C-alpha cells in the first residue's frame, strides 16, 4: 500500500511540475508580448510628438502669412473684414412644427 502511495505522490509531483512549467512559459510569453506592445506604443507616441511638432512648425502665423501674400492674386484672396459677417438675426431658421400633447 505504501508503494502505491509513493507512486501516486510521484505522479502528482510530476503533474504539478509540468503544470508549473506551463504556467511559467505562458507568463513569460505574455510578459514578452506586453514589452513589445509597450515598445510599439512608445515608438508611436514619439512619432506622434514629431508630427505635432511638424504641424506646429507648418502652421506658424508668419509662414501662413507669407503663403497668403505669395498666392493672394492667383487664388483671389481678399482681406477679411467685419463687413463680411452677418448678424444672428439675419439667419433664416426653418419653421418648427408645434407639438401637441398627443405627440408626446
Image: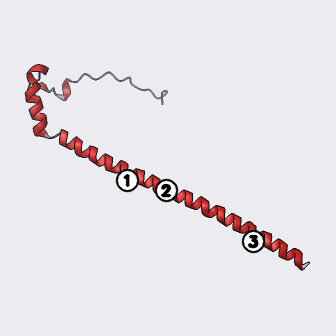
- Which is closer to the viewer, label 3 or label 2? 3
Sort mark 2 into few (<14), some (14-19) or many (20+) by Cα contacts within 10 Å. Answer: few
Label whose residue precedes the other's in the sequence (3 or 2):
3
Q: Position of residue 9 (x, y in %)?
A: 80, 74
The quarter of the displayed image where residue 80 is located = top left
For discs 1 and 3, the disc positioned in front in the rendered view? 3
Q: Dot 3, crowdedness within 10 Å: few (<14), some or many (≥20)? A: few
Mark 1 vs mark 3: which is more N-terminal? 3
Which residue matches tag 3?
13
Residue 6: x and y in percent read 84, 76
Q: Which residue is drawn at 31% across and 21% down?
A: 94
**Dot 1 or dot 2, earlier in sequence:** 2
Where is residue 99 shown, x and y percent of the image?
Answer: 42, 26
Q: How far apart are marks 1 and 2 (CA)?
A: 12 Å
Q: Which residue corresponds to mark 2?
A: 34
Q: Is residue 81 visible?
A: no
* Residue ID for mark 1: 42
Q: Is mark 1 on a helix, strand or loop?
A: helix
Q: Quadrant of residue 75?
A: top left
Amino acid at each position: 500500500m505504501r508503494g502505491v502511495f509513493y507512486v501516486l505522490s510521484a505522479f502528482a509531483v510530476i503533474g504539478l511540475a509540468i503544470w508549473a512549467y506551463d504556467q511559467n512559459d505562458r507568463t513569460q510569453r505574455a510578459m514578452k508580448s506586453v514589452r513589445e506592445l509597450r515598445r510599439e506604443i512608445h515608438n508611436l507616441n514619439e512619432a506622434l510628438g514629431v508630427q505635432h511638432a511638424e504641424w506646429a512648425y507648418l502652421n506658424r502665423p508668419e509662414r501662413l502669412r507669407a503663403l497668403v501674400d505669395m498666392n493672394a492674386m492667383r487664388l483671389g484672396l481678399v482681406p477679411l473684414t467685419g463687413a463680411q459677417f452677418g448678424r444672428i438675426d439675419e439667419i433664416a431658421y426653418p419653421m418648427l412644427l408645434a407639438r401637441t400633447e398627443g405627440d408626446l
